[in-house]
Amino acid sequence: MNQPHPGHPAQVPVLALGDVLLVSLQGELHDGMAEQLQHDITSRIATSRVTGVVIDISGVDMVDSFLGRVLAEIASTAGLLAARTVLAGMRPAVAITLVELGLTLPGLVTALDVDRAMELLTQRGS
Amino acid sequence: MQPSGQATATSLPIGSDADLAWVRQHVRQCAAQLGFGLVQQTKLVTAASELARNTLVHGGGGRAEITPLDNGRTRGLRMRFIDSGPGIRDLELAMTDGYTSGGGLGLGLSGARRLVHEFGVDTEPGRGTTVTAVAWVAPVPSSRPGVG
Amino acid sequence: MLALTLLLCTLRLVVMETALDANAELIERQRQQLLEVATPVIKLWEGTVAVPLIGTLDSARSQVVMESLLEAIVDQRARYAILDITGVPTVDSLVAQHLMKTVAAARLMGAECIVSGIRPAIAQTIVQLGIDLGTVLTRASLSDALAYALSKQGIEVSRTDAGASAR
């Protein structure tokens, strides 16, 4: 497995596709990076016309309660700013672990992958 | 496959975010080497992340001790998280789902316990806390009562 | 001389232990394989997968079921996953808990899970035990569950004239 160097902090890029923000999380995510991301997304929604946020976690091999909370908070904050958030691509092992951990993220909309997430956002949006 | 030599513990410091990432990566590597399946690896790494964060946030930092185990029938991994922080005053309360003293979801201890096979907390107010978690590769499906 | 004998004995012991270990490992592997064989995941339709559960659901087996169902959801890009418990003799709180965990995990991956084949007796036990399956979508039979999954995907199944006359 070639994970990025864990001591190497980086920012998570936030892409804009039309009025949807696409965030692709990859590998190790530091707590600080996750909080920074939360801040970035919120300010992007506030400053530009954003109706949806897709968070792709297909490249993430672990979600603990901290990251789970950050994801849930991003979704509720985006919701307050009238943008819908879809969490896409969670791996089976991660889903099983989250459920065992007791974190079922009931408020989050989920999709199998980014394609499905986009479908979901455009369907409801129109 | 090597016959089991006396396995040695690896000690990792827990003092920052980046250290949590190191602990996770080390646990992932060990678990894969020991033959844990992908789901069990993920559970171990997640448990390690929860417990190491507890050590950092509530214990004011400390260290993790990761030890490969071999009981003759199967292999396992022991993770120990040691801090000399304030300790846990009400352990039973701390082990309850949803209880939190720091901004988390309150799933740290209780959640991590569900991800491993053996779990123990040794704490004394003012002296610190040691949390020990052990998981075995493909454990015998004994009458382990439903967790949670 | 004595030392040599001792050494040989030790060697023999080591060889035997290794053989025993290998055996135990084989049994463990076969047990695991048996578990996997006993729980096939079937593709019922484009985007719909199902696992017919037969026999007792213990913790080890539920784990295998959950894993293979979730893998199938990824492989088949399924939107709907059906857990059919027609062949499960009893549902206690532990089994119910396993079902709910599977449903929750599937939802996290973006698929909706339907539990079908709840026989009247089992429905009664579930209620009597006070198990809350409130968050779980249930249907009486596998075909009801499939009908639900199809209609949600906008697929309509109708009888052709030829089929109707065959009755």
Image (cartoon, helix red, strand yellow):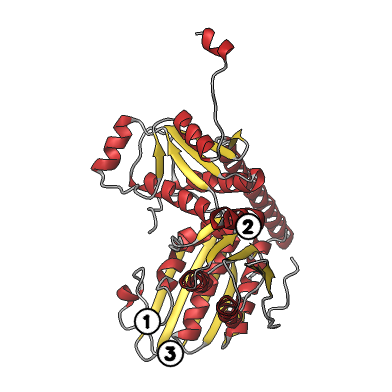
Q: Are marks 1 and 2 on the same chain?
A: no
Residues under labels 3 and 2: Cα distance? 47 Å
For the residue marked with disc 1, what is the amino acid? Ser
Q: Position of residue A105 (x, y in %)?
A: 46, 62
- On residue C19, the disc is none
Rendered view: B24 above or below A106: below
In front: C106, or B101?
C106
Residues under labels 1 and 2: Cα distance? 38 Å
For label 1, the residue is B101
In front: C56, or A53?
A53
Rendered view: C144 above or below B144: above
For the residue marked with disc 3, what is the amino acid? Gly
Q: Position of residue A104 (x, y in %)?
A: 45, 60
For label 3, the residue is B85
Q: Chain of mark 1?
A: B
Q: Chain of mark 3?
A: B
For the residue marked with disc 2, what is the amino acid? Met
Q: Chain of mark 2?
A: A
Q: Position of residue B108 (x, y in %)?
A: 44, 73
Q: Are marks 3 and 2 on the same chain?
A: no
Tell me the element at label 3.
loop
Residues under labels 1 and 3: Cα distance? 14 Å
